[in-house]
Amino acid sequence: MNELLSTLTSPGQPETLYKALEKYLASTIGFGLFTLLYRDGDEVARVYSTNETAYPVFGRKHMGPTPWGEKVIDRQEAFLGPDPEAIIWAFYDHELIFSLGLGAVINIPVVYNGETIGTMNLLDKSGGYTEQHLQEAQALAPLLIPAYLQARRR
């Protein structure tokens, strides 16, 4: 964890932090896909992805209301989706997720000054995540605040 924290002072931000976070999460929680999404008003943008073929980094797009968005974005509650049924409930692109062999998800809201400014997203095989994994991931979300605030300024 100290090594991860020290990356915040390293040059090449925010990519240096994103890569260090990827490495840390791979060695602790594990994932089949790791993405980072920042939010600015009703717009969102994916700024990091470990699978850019299926989930590329992209410019801003409008995000309409969804039950998932109400939970994670509006109520600022982390989401643990342990199985394919949860994936279907949460994501319109569940077929793509399943085609990658993924069937569980953790979405952590990144909150600054009372506002959800983004999410940290981990996906893995069905049954791959527990409440303990969710709590471990939640502890890391504040590290993304400077990077997401910077992304919003661009």
Image: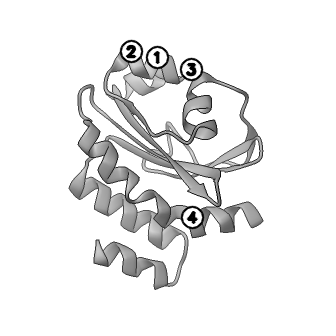
Quarter holding the C terminus? bottom right
Which SS class for mark 4? helix
Please state if 79 lies on the left or on the right of 59 as rendered: left
Amino acid type at mark 4: Ile
Q: Position of residue 70 (x, y in %)?
A: 62, 30
The residue at 51%/23% (across/down) is: 90
Q: Please determine whether, in this image, residue 101 is positioned above or below residue 22.
A: above
Which mark identifies residue 145? 4
The quarter of the displayed image where residue 129 is located: top left
Q: Find disc 2 in the rendering and name its residue.
A: 85
Q: Find disc 3 in the rendering and name its residue.
A: 92
Q: Find disc 1 in the rendering and name its residue.
A: 88
Sequence-wise first label, 4 or 3: 3
Which SS class for mark 3? loop
Mark 1–mark 4 contact, CB under 8 Å? no
Sequence-wise first label, 4 or 2: 2
The residue at 32%/21% (across/down) is: 83
